[in-house]
Image (spheres, rainbow, N blue to C red):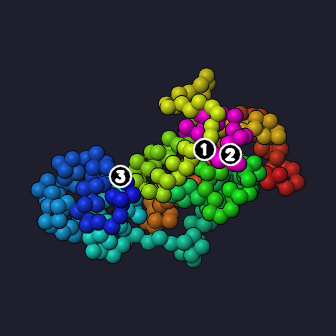
Amino acid sequence: MTTTALSRRPVGELLRQWREHRRLSQLDLAIQADISTRHLSFLETGRSNPSREMVLLLAEHLDLSLRERNRLLLAAGFAPVFTETTLDAPGMRAVRRAIKQVLAGHEPYPAVVVDGRWNLVDGNTSLGVLTSLVSPTLLAAPANVLRASLHPDGLAPHIVNLGEWRAHLLGRLRRQIALTADPQLETLDQELRAYPCDQPEPEVELPGPGEIVVPLKLRHEEGELTFFSTIATFGTPLDITVAELAIESFYPADEFTADALRKIASQPGGSSS
C-alpha cells in the first residue's frame, strides 16, 4: 500500500485497500467478521455507511493498529476512540515506572525503548556500550536506533557480521511495513538500504554452526562482544503510544561477553565509557 493509498479517502475505499493489502477476498473477511459478503460489498462501495461498531469489528479482523483504527473511524465520520498520550503525562506514570523497572532490572546488559518508528524513547545505563560507538549527531533527538545501527557513522563499522545483522534489521523493518503500510517507515527503509555495506547480505536467515539466534557481533575495546536480543511489548494496550512502544533487551551470547559487560559496568563511569 502506497502513501497515496493512506491519504484521506472514504471509509469504504480504506476498508477495501486494507483488505487487499491483507490479501483477503470479500468472502474471507465477511466470514471472519460474520457478516454477509453483500453487506461488505455495500460498505466498500459506499452504498451503505458502517456503524461505529462495524468499523471497529472490521478493523479488528483486518488486524489494524490502534492508530489505523482511529483513521477508519474518522473517515466514517466518528470520533477516534483510542487516545495518544505523551509518556510524560500524569496518567502514564505506571507505564513510565514499568519501563524504568525493566530497564534497571536488565543491568549490566543493554536495553532500549523505541516507539513504532524506531525512535529512541529511553535506555538503561548499559546502553552506553553501544551508543559510545555512535557519532553524537546520530544520537541527537529524535534519534532513530535503526539509523544509528546501520549508518557509516554509527555502529556499522564496529559490527563484525554487518551483512548478516543488516539483513536481519532490514527484514524486520520490511515485515513491519507489510503490517502497517506506514509511509514514514517506507522512507526510512529506503534510506537504510542506501547505506554502504561491504559484506554479503543473506536473502534468507540461516543458522551458522551452533547458532540458535541471529547474533550481533561487536568490535569493542574489551574484545569481540556477542549479543542476542528479545523484544517486549505491552500486552493489553488501549493507548496508541503504549501500543507502539517496544523494549529491546540485549543479552550476552557467551561468557566472555557477560564478563566484559560486568567489568565495564564496574568501572568509573560505567557503561558510558
For mark 1, give the secondary structure: loop
Residue 260 magenta: no
x then y, percent, for residue 235: 47, 56
| Residue type beneath disc 2 | Pro
Give the side of residue 169 with respect to residue 57, left or right.
right
Give the side of residue 8 with respect to residue 110, left or right.
left
Mark 1, residue position: 195
Magenta region, main secondary structure: helix
Query: Alpha carbon of mark 1 to alpha carbon of mark 3: how far?
Result: 24 Å
x then y, percent, for residue 229: 61, 43
Within 10 Å of disc 1 (Cα), the crowding (few <14, some 14-19, many 20+) is few
* Range covered by the magenta-colored residues: 149-168
Most distant residue in the top direction: 209
Q: Residue at x 41, y 64 (%)?
A: 67
Q: Residue at x 23, y 62 (%)?
A: 12
Mark 2, residue position: 152
Mark 3, residue position: 1
For mark 3, give the secondary structure: loop
